Amino acid sequence: MNSQKWLDVLERKIGKIAIPNLMRYIIFGNAIVYVIGLVIPLFPYYLIMDPEEVLHGQVWRLITFIFVPGMGGILPTLLSLFCYYWIGGALERTWGTFKFNFFYWVGVIAIDIVLFIAHFMGESVPIFVHQAGYLSQSMFLALATMYPDVQVLLMFIIPLKAKYMGYFSAALLLYEFIVGALIIKLLILASMVGYMIFLGPELFGRIRAKIRREQYERKMTQGPIGGFSRKPQDYGAAGRAAYRETKKSPQQGKVITGVAFHHCTVCGITELDDPNMTFRYCSQCNGNYEYCENHIHNHQHIQ
């Protein structure tokens, strides 16, 4: 059972407990804590996740750390809160309320767990580390993975495709993971749990599909088979249908096998990966773009 199917089962059972517009409340809480922190600088430190204090009864810290913003300047903080409010809303509209709640709360629980592990190992989180910061970054990476060609404004000025900002964010995370202390490594891994559950299989599928396409293109440039060009761009819907009827090569006198005739534009899955998968073309995309049943209703239309 893949992640989407077991999440659908879980949603049917406990979906009612999901919080609609979750990011609205989280961002509002961040704003309140930021304002209070300007007046009472020590206030945010009573909310951060501190395993030692939790063991002494301050159990609210297991959750309240998500309301502690990075205590920078007013303008950068406002821009950051607005961006993550927009990102969270976009993810909730894409996945639905329950799945977005699951994505976020599984990250919160994972952070709690690794901070307890670090505590018992004698490690502690430096005060300047934004405990929920990496979780917010994982939200942006999720959005960039699903909608790589969406235009976003860097600092509300410079238009960039989400995928380029995603590459930069991923590279920054990787750098921090490599050079950071053990507690930083644990925080990054914990914050990425939701991303790996929702998008890990798709990301690995894209990588595999890219490798398959490159291998296929190398084969197709070696010469004609059955009167057809080996260039992949020559195979439209009609071409693939005709090619299926002529799989027996007159030159070689044997049946050609191992060639996929369907492939999802988003995740790259083919009928060779899953013989039971259904593929359909999108009438709203400009061109012959094919999608699997998981992405026919969940993709950005290509114009």
Image (spheres, helix red, strand yellow):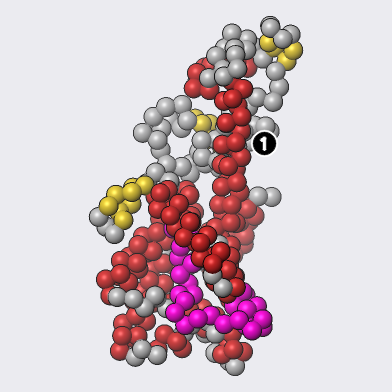
Q: Amino acid at mark 1?
A: Asp
Q: Residue at x 61, y 29 (%)?
A: 215
| Residue 290 percent across, percent down from the top left | 51, 31
| Residue 155 percent across, percent down from the top left | 29, 59
Image-quadrant location for residue 284: top left
Residue farthest along the right direction in this orientation: 254
Q: Residue at x 58, y 56 (%)?
A: 196
- The number of numbered discs placed on residues in the rendered structure image is 1
In the shown orientation, is residue 267 left or right of residue 137?
right
Mark 1 crowdedness (10 Å alpha carbons): few <14, some 14-19, many ≥20? few
| Residue 99 percent across, percent down from the top left | 53, 59
Q: Is residue 218 visible?
A: yes
Image-quadrant location for residue 182: bottom right
Judging by the rendered image, the residue that carries numbered circle 1 is 273
Q: Is residue 92 visible?
A: no
Task: Establish if 54 lies above or below 208.
Answer: below
Task: Establish if 1 lies above or below 61.
Answer: above
In the shown orientation, is residue 237 left or right of residue 123?
left
Q: Secondary structure at mark 1?
A: loop
Q: Residue at x 56, y 90 (%)?
A: 53
Task: Establish if 177 lies above or below 34.
Answer: above
Does residue 29 show up magenta in the picture? no
| Residue 34 percent across, percent down from the top left | 34, 80
Nearer to us in this view, 301 or 161: 161
In the shown orientation, is residue 145 left or right of residue 119?
left
Residue farthest along the front direction in this orientation: 179
Residue farthest along the top direction in this orientation: 250
Task: Establish if 199 lies above or below 65.
Answer: above
Q: Residue at x 35, y 85 (%)?
A: 37
Quadrant of the frame with the C terminus = top left
- The residue segment tinted magenta is 113-140
